[in-house]
Amino acid sequence: MNNKIKILILISAVVFTIASCYNNKEDILALPTISFRGEVVPIITGGPCGCHNNGSTRAVQFSHVDTIFNDAILSRKSKFDSMARFTGYHPGQGVVEFSANEKIIIKTWVLQGGKDDAGGCTVTGAITYTAKILPIYTTSCKGATCHGGIAVALDYARLVSKKDVLTTIVNSGGNNGHPGGAMSLSTCTVNIFKEWLNQGQPQ
């Protein structure tokens, strides 16, 4: 076998090998998406954030795991990201540390957009302040570092008087209108507030 044929066979083998590598899909699979409901919420409602899950009004509560109360977690994703990146960072008193794996999950979730991976939410029936709006406020907005603490306490009369502000907040999904900065709101919370506003803000 002459040298030209040997070189041709060698080149063909190299080309075939390179082609096979590109066909190996395992090498180019995208990183899996972190599930807010399945991975992030269990971390936040677990051990590291005890005072937020004990039913106290001292701190905003995270333990109400459903389509409404997850806003308390979503709206604080930048704080959780800082806690995952900087040792000893915690907006309240004391040192709160996530485990190494929990830090990876939280940082990756935030890098991927920090979204809620739940499905949509259809709101039907009468929406009243007492039955629907107050529970959201009490769990997601009330606390020492929020409304009723360093920010003004809200009640029915104040929310009614701030209809324009609420409208801007819910129409932007929390990105605009909130005096304390942007918030991340779940689809359910947005839909509930929109329907409450549409129904004339009944008490």
Image (cartoon, rainbow, N blue to C red):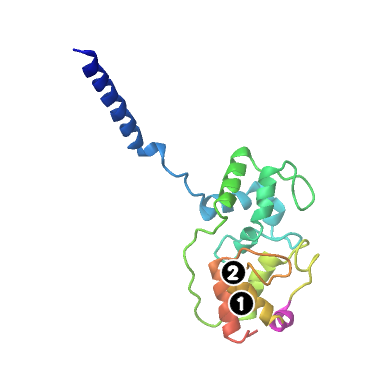
User: Magenta stretch containing residue 83, yes or no?
Assistant: no
Name the quadrant containing residue 71: bottom right
The disc, 1 or 2, on the residue closer to the chain's N-terminal end is 1
Q: Circle 1 sits in a helix, a strand or a loop, which is it?
A: helix
Q: Main secondary structure of the magenta part?
A: helix
Report the front residue among 75 and 21. 21
Q: Helix, strand or loop at disc 2?
A: loop
Nearer to us of marks 1 and 2 is: 2
Would residue 183 be found to the left or right of residue 90 on screen?
A: left
What separation in Å lies between label 1 and label 2 (alpha carbons)? 22 Å
Residue 197 horizontal side relative to residue 121, left or right: right
Q: In the image, what residue occupies the spot 24% across and 22% down?
A: 8
- Specify start and end residues of the magenta stretch as a single range: 155-161
Label 1 environment density (alpha carbons within 10 Å; few <14, some 14–19, many ≥20): few
- The location of residue 180, given as percent across then percent down, is 73, 66
Which residue is rendered at x = 74% and y = 80% of the image? 158
- Relative horizontal placement of residue 198, taking residue 31 as reference (left or right): right
Q: Please, what is the three-letter code of the amino acid marked with disc 1? A: Ala
Position in image of residue 98 (x %, y %): 66, 43
Residue that badge 1 annotates: 131
Q: Residue furthest bottom?
A: 200
Quarter in which the N terminus is drawn: top left
- Quarter of the image for residue 116 reads bottom right
Q: Is residue 177 above or below residue 94?
A: below
Residue, disc 2: 173
Q: Residues within 10 Å of mark 2 (few under 14, many from 20)?
A: some
The kind of residue tagged 2 is Gly
